[in-house]
Image: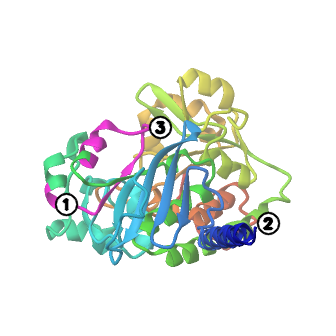
Amino acid sequence: MLFIRNIVLIFMIFLFANCDNTKQKQNIEQKTSNQIKYSSLFDINKFENYKKISIFDPWNKDKVLKTYYLVPNYISDLKNIPNDGIIVRTPVKNVIALSSTQIGILNSLKQINSIKAVAEKKLIYNQQIRDLIDEGKIKIVHESMSLDFEKVINMKPDVVFATGWNTVDSKFLRLEEAGIPTAYIYEWQENSPLARAEWLKFIAAFFDDDKKADSIFNEIDKNYKQLLELTKSIAEKPSVLHGSMIKDTWFVPGGKSYVANLYNQAAANYIWKDNDDKASLSLSFEVVLSKAANADFWIFSTYAKNKQEFENSNERYKLFAAFINNKLYSNIKRLNIDGANDYWESGIVKPDIILKDVIKILHPKVLKEHQLFYFEHFN
């Protein structure tokens, strides 16, 4: 009996010790988990020897679309790294960035020198990157809507940052099969400007720049919330029409999009606020005119440089009250000689500045001293 009691005692001690170790491990994971405040499309969890990033399917958030395990270069033994995702060694040194928003984020993190290739020079506003392209230090790998696979594979980048237009793009699977990790960015599917900005934490994780990203984002968040305090007491909310014709279609942001959210936070009555879509709506001119002919303001993105050029692109624009009343604003204030627009580049990490601009447009007395940064008045 004494022998059995001793065996039971040893077993209980072992069991409790195991439980205690499990709790300690869980506590370590909880303490080092990244605090993702707004994004619903990715998550970061830090473990003792690696970081786990999960990307959720924008069209089915219960589904994990991609999993990445970011493992520091000093970890030589990978046997304890889970095998259900893509392993990326960090910090990455050589990356390919295929969209303007990624360049905006990389610039904010001071990681321009890590960029070894981009899509097209004419789409880039950042002068430092344009100079590096001219010097041959940054390559072009995505001209004429086609990715040069051989060039990318031969460059052997640590990671390719790509915009996720679909769930998983088949063309990027080819890169993964060649051993080149592709990190999908779905910021455009977020439902708020702050959620979009938070993707800087996603990209920063690959550089082990988590603390820097947290610091940058916390400042953005603080500034943004201060602006929300200014607008929450505004009673009069002017109506806003967004967008313009592209060939035969007028694309307007859905009522659950980050653009609709921006207008709501700027104390505006967005014309399509009651719509339930996050993606853009494809509408005819007639449908838009019937719903938004009397909108107080009209905000859009265009290649036109002034009101006359804008009217020349479609004479029917003058049927809108906002056009007649000179309440037209376009986000073209920061264009370079090729027409690249900084709004689409740095704007992702400056949602507070964009919100300031929109408040200034709609409620000029609220921010009397602010000068428009991204937007220009067409009159």
Nearest to viewer (mark 1 / mark 2): 1
Q: Earlier in the sequence, mark 1 or mark 3?
A: 1
Which residues are the magenta region? 154-176
Q: Position of residue 121 (x, y in %)?
A: 25, 57
Element at label 1: loop
Amino acid carrying label 2: it is: Glu
Q: Earlier in the sequence, mark 2 or mark 3?
A: 2
Of 322 and 28, nearer the camera is 28
Q: Residue most toward the front?
A: 1
Residue at 61%, 73% (x, y): give it: 28
Element at label 2: helix
Q: Which residue is mark 2?
A: 229
* Disc 1 to disc 2, C-alpha distance: 48 Å
User: Which quadrant of the structure image shows residue 170?
Assistant: top left
Numbered label attached to residue 156: 1
Q: Position of residue 160 (x, y in %)?
A: 31, 56
The stretch drawn in magenta includes residue 169: yes
Q: Position of residue 91 (x, y in %)?
A: 36, 73
Amino acid carrying label 3: it is: Glu
Amino acid carrying label 1: it is: Lys
Screen quadrant of the N terminus: bottom right
Can see residue 293? no
Q: Which residue is mark 3?
A: 311
Q: Is residue 20 left or right of residue 150?
A: right
Can see residue 295? yes
The stretch drawn in magenta includes residue 174: yes
Of 300 and 258, nearer the camera is 258
Q: Is residue 79 left or right of residue 274?
A: left
Q: Residues within 10 Å of mark 3 (few under 14, many from 20)?
A: some
